[in-house]
Amino acid sequence: MSDDPPEHRKPPRREFITGISAMVIGAAASVVPLAAGVAALLDPLRRRRSGQGMVRVTKLSTIPESGLPKKFTVRTDRVDAWTTYSDTPVGAVYLRRSPDGVAALNVVCPHAGCFVGLAPDKSRFACPCHKSSFDLKGVVDDPSSPAPRNMDTLEVEIRNGDEVWVRFQNFLPGRAEKTPV
Ligand code: FES
């Protein structure tokens, strides 16, 4: 006597395979639009990261000829995910006349992100949070400073004779190397 089930009780094999195939194709077909939707949803965020560029900060004539650094607010259009805010403060820089023209430093301390100030005698930069100290070029000048690197330099361009443009960028604090945010 055979143990095989009667013919009418056997699973319909062809239908089973056809059903599985349909499920796989259906799942694959739904993944593609889903991925495209997610990409479209995240697109403004990607554009925001790649949208950092030169920002006009001030006129050359406003920077002291003495070589002392002066602090300037950086204003530009800011894209926050899906919204654009026009002419908004996005940070600040110290600008200083240098033999090459103008040098720019981000005011944010590379230790933990506080705003670095000028020392009262204006001979150096001093961070109020944990006492990091930098010379006027932004170089750490006190070995006991907790800052893991110098202040962050930024690219500067003088355009049309008197316009000071800065490639404004923030960098991650707490690291020895400059890592753009
Ligand atoms: S944040 Fe500047 S020394 Fe800590």
Image (cartoon, helix red, strand yellow):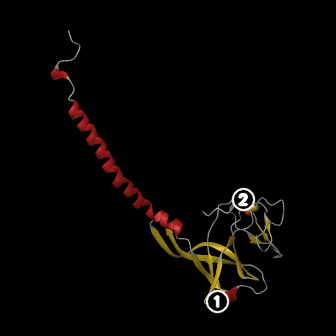
Q: Residue at x 35, y 50 (%)?
A: 31
Of the pair 91 and 49, the residue shown nearer to us: 49
Q: Quadrant of the N terminus?
A: top left
Q: Is residue 175 left or right of residue 10?
A: right
Q: Is residue 127 left or right of residue 9?
A: right
Query: What's under tag 1, amino acid-wise?
Result: Asp
Q: Is residue 164 above or below residue 179?
A: below
Does any atom of ligand 1 lie closer than 8 Å to the CB of label 2?
A: no
Q: Residues within 10 Å of mark 2 (few under 14, many from 20)?
A: few
* First in residue order: circle 1 vs circle 2: 1
Name the residue carrying label 1.
162
Which residue is outermost to the top? 1
Q: Which mark is residue 176?
A: 2
Q: Is residue 97 above or below residue 139?
A: below
Q: Disc 2 on helix, strand or loop?
A: loop
Residue 147 position by quadrant: bottom right
Q: Quadrant of the C terminus?
A: bottom right
Where residue 65 appears, as percent x and y from the top left, is 76, 87
Q: Is residue 175 above or below residue 12?
A: below
Query: What's under tag 2, amino acid-wise?
Result: Ala
Where residue 51 appears, as percent x and y from the top left, is 52, 70
Q: Residue at x 22, y 16 (%)?
A: 4
Of the pair 148 and 64, the residue shown nearer to us: 148
